[in-house]
Image (cartoon, rainbow, N blue to C red):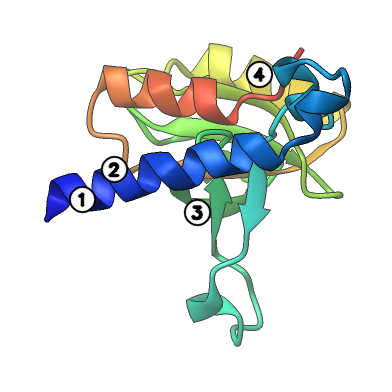
């Protein structure tokens, strides 16, 4: 039965390409040229905290589609820098990620304070802290997925 479903899927995919305007002199890569912008990370507010007067948590959807839950801290709140092995996101008032970094295993205070000051000067109003990445590889993957394109 699975083979039939797979074969049916292939037929449908072929039909989509057969209906595409390639026959009008367009190349296959032109079909995807309409996607001018690369996908970017976007904030997805959490419904469970929608009724609260103070937003404490949010979620971000990375370019890959992966969801990352984060705690929200004001840019000047030193508690945001006290976490070890966390992904830190500097977020602007218009809800864009300006910068991202790994807090590291030791939470080196001087380096994190300099980062906090530089992102505040760049326009960040909040620091979002993602604590659910289990190891260094997971944090690196989250950073690559969430970091703004340069």
First in residue order: circle 3 vs circle 2: 2
Please state which of residues 44 and 55 is positioned toward the viewer in this rendering.
44
Above or below, 45 against 41 in this view is: below
For label 3, the crowd category at 10 Å Cα-Cα, with few meaning under 14, some 14 to 19 and many 20 or more, is: some
Give the spatial CA distance, label 3 vs label 1.
46 Å
Q: Are marks 1 and 2 in contact (CB under 8 Å)?
A: yes
User: Which residue position is annotated with label 2?
Assistant: 7
What mark, if any, has residue 4 been given in the picture?
Answer: 1
- Please, what secondary structure does the residue beneath circle 4 have? helix
What mark, if any, has residue 115 been given in the picture?
Answer: 4
First in residue order: circle 4 vs circle 3: 3
Please name the residue shown 29% across and 18% down the image: 137
Give the spatial CA distance, label 4 vs label 3.
18 Å
Give the spatial CA distance, label 4 vs label 2.
53 Å
Image depth: mark 1 or mark 4 in front: 1
- Please, what secondary structure does the residue beneath circle 1 have? helix
First in residue order: circle 3 vs circle 1: 1
User: Which residue position is annotated with label 3?
Assistant: 71
Give the spatial CA distance, label 1 vs label 4.
55 Å
């Amino acid at each position: 039965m699975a083979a039939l479903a797979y074969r049916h899927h292939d037929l449908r995919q072929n039909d989509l390409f057969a209906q595409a305007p390639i026959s009008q002199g367009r190349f296959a890569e032109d079909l995807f040229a309409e996607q001018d912008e690369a996908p970017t990370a976007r904030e997805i507010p959490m419904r469970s905290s929608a009724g609260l007067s103070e937003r404490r948590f949010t979620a971000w959807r990375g370019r890959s589609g992966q969801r990352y839950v984060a705690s929200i801290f004001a840019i000047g709140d030193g508690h945001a820098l006290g976490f070890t092995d966390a992904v830190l996101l500097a977020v602007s008032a218009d809800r864009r990620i300006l910068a991202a970094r790994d807090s590291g295993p030791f939470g080196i205070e001087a380096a994190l304070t300099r980062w906090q000051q530089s992102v505040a000067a760049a326009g960040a109003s909040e620091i979002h802290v993602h604590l659910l990445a289990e190891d260094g590889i997971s944090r690196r993957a989250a950073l690559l997925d969430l970091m703004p394109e340069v």
